[in-house]
Amino acid sequence: MKLYDHLIQFVEQKLGPIAGKLGSQRHITALRDGFLVAMPFIIVGSFILIFANPPFAADTTNAFGRAWLDFVAANRPTIVMPWTMSMGIMSLFITMGVAYSLARSYKMDAIGAAALSAMSFLLVAAPEKGWALPLNHFGGTGIFTALLVAYFSVELTRILKKYNITIRMPEQVPPAIAASFALLVPVLAIFLTLYPLSLFVQSEFAMQIPDAVMTIFKPLVSASNSLPAIIGALLLCQLLWFAGIHGANIVVGILSPIFLANIGANAAAYAAGDTVPNLFTQPFWDFYIFIGGAGATLSLVILMSFSKTAHLRSVGRMSFLPGAFQINEPVMFGAPVVMNPTLFIPFVMAPVVNAVIAYVAVNTGIVDKAIAVTPWTAPALIGAAWGAGWAFKASILTAVLMVIDIMIYYPFFKAYEKQVMAQEQATASEATKTEESGNPAIA
C-alpha cells in the first residue's frame, strides 16, 4: 500500500502537472487538432485502398472474389485515384490543419496561415517538374516535414507581426483585403528562407527536405516499433489515466505523427505489393492494447454487468455500449477505476499483456500488420480486421485478448465487488436503523 501511495503521490505532484502543461501547450494542441482535420480524408482513403486490393488470392476460384479481382485489374488507375487524392496526400491536409489551429491559438489569420503553410510545404516537398508536381512526399514520408513547415510558417508570421514588419492598410479597407496584403511579407519571407534551404539540400545532399527530415527521424520511427517503446508509451498513458488525467489525449497526441508515418508507409507498401514494414500503428494501439478504452476496460465492464452488487451491475450495463465503441469514461469514473487501488494492478497489467501478445502475433506474421486508418470509435473486433485490410485473424486476436483480460481482471474485480457489497449492506443496515428509530412502535 505504501508503494501504491508513493506512486500516486508521484503522479499527482510530479508527473501530473508536467503532463497537464504538455497537454495544453499550443503546439501540441495544434498537432492534435491538425491531425483531426486530415482524419476524414485518411479514413475514406483507407476504404478505397482496401477495395483496390481485394482480400483474395490471385488464383482464387471464388466467383465473387474472381469478379472483384478482375474488376480491379481492369480499372485500377481509376479506382486508386481517390486514394491518391485523399490518404495519398495526407501531409498536405495535416500541414494546413496544424497551421490553422496554431494560428487560431495566437489569434492570427487562420485561413491565411493554412494557405501559407500549404505553399511552404509544396515549395520544399514537391518541386515542379515539367508542369507536374511529384506526390511521392505527400503521404507518410512527408508528415514530419509538414509539421515543421506548419510551425515555422506560423511562427515566422507571428514574429514579423510582432515587430511590425508588415504592410498596413488604411482602416477603410475591408478586413479580408487587409489580411491578404498583410500576408505578402510572410510569403516573401518564406521564399527567402525555405526555398534557398531546399535548393541547398538538393544540391549538396542530392535529396529533398522531406528525405532529409525522414533520415533524422528514422531512428525514432524505428524505435517506435519496438516492444519497450510500446510498453513505455502505454504505461505513461495508464499512470496519467489512473490519476484522473486523460492520458490518451496527451500520449496519443504526441504519438500521432509516428502513427500516421507508419500507417502511410504501410499503405504505400501494400498498394505496391511490397512487404508491410511497420507494426506500431493507431489500430494496434486501439484494438489490441486498449480494447474498450484505456486499461482494456471492456472486459471489466463485461464482468461488472453480471455483478452481485446493484452499483457495479448498473454501471457495467450502462457502460457496455460506450465501451464497445472504445469510450470508457462511464466506467472509469462510475466504478470508479480512477484512483481505485484494488483495480490498479489489472488496469496496468491487462494492456501490457495485450501489447506483448499482440506484438509477438503481429511481428511473427501470424496476424497481418495494419494498412488502413480506422475511426478510434470502431468496435474493437471490427476495427482490428478493418485496419488489417479485413484480415479476420486480427479479430480473432482481439477476441483472445479480451478473454485474457477478463481472466486478469476477474480476481481483482471479485475483491472489489466484496468491498462494494459490504458498503451496500452497511448503507442498507444504517437506513433500516434510521427508519426504525424514526417510527417507534405504537403500544
Image (spheres, rainbow, N blue to C red):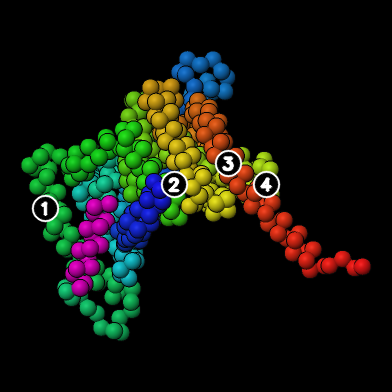
Q: Which residues are magenta?
A: 147-162
User: Is there a contact, CB below 8 Å, between mark 4 and mark 2?
Assistant: no
Q: Quadrant of residue 369?
A: top left
Which image quarter holds the C terminus?
Answer: bottom right
Crowd around label 2: few <14 · some 14–19 · many ≥20 (10 Å): few
Q: Say which element carries label 2.
A: loop
Nearer the observer, 427 or 243: 427
Question: How far is the residue under mark 4 from the one under mark 2?
Answer: 25 Å
Q: Which residue is mark 4?
A: 309
User: Is there a contact, CB below 8 Å, between mark 3 and mark 2?
Assistant: no
Question: How far is the residue under mark 1 from the one under mark 4?
Answer: 69 Å
Q: Which residue is mark 3?
A: 415
Q: Residue at x 26, y 47 (%)?
A: 144
Q: Which residue is mark 1?
A: 196
Q: Say which element carries label 4.
A: loop
Question: How far is the residue under mark 4 from the one under mark 3?
Answer: 12 Å
Q: Say which element carries label 3.
A: helix
Nearer the observer, 310 or 73: 310
User: Label 1 amino acid?
Assistant: Pro
Nearer the observer, 249 or 206: 249
Q: Which marked residue is nearer to the observer: mark 4 or mark 3? A: 3
Q: Is residue 154 magenta?
A: yes
Q: Is residue 291 left or right of 159 when viewed as pictured?
A: right
| Residue 347 in view here | yes
Where does the image place residue 211, in percent across and percent down from the top left?
20, 40
User: Is there a contact, CB below 8 Å, between mark 1 and mark 2?
Assistant: no
User: Label 4 amino acid?
Assistant: Thr
Q: Earlier along the polypeptide chain: callout 3 or callout 2?
A: 2
Question: How far is the residue under mark 3 from the one under mark 1?
Answer: 66 Å
Q: Which marked residue is nearer to the observer: mark 4 or mark 2? A: 2
Q: Earlier along the polypeptide chain: callout 4 or callout 3?
A: 4
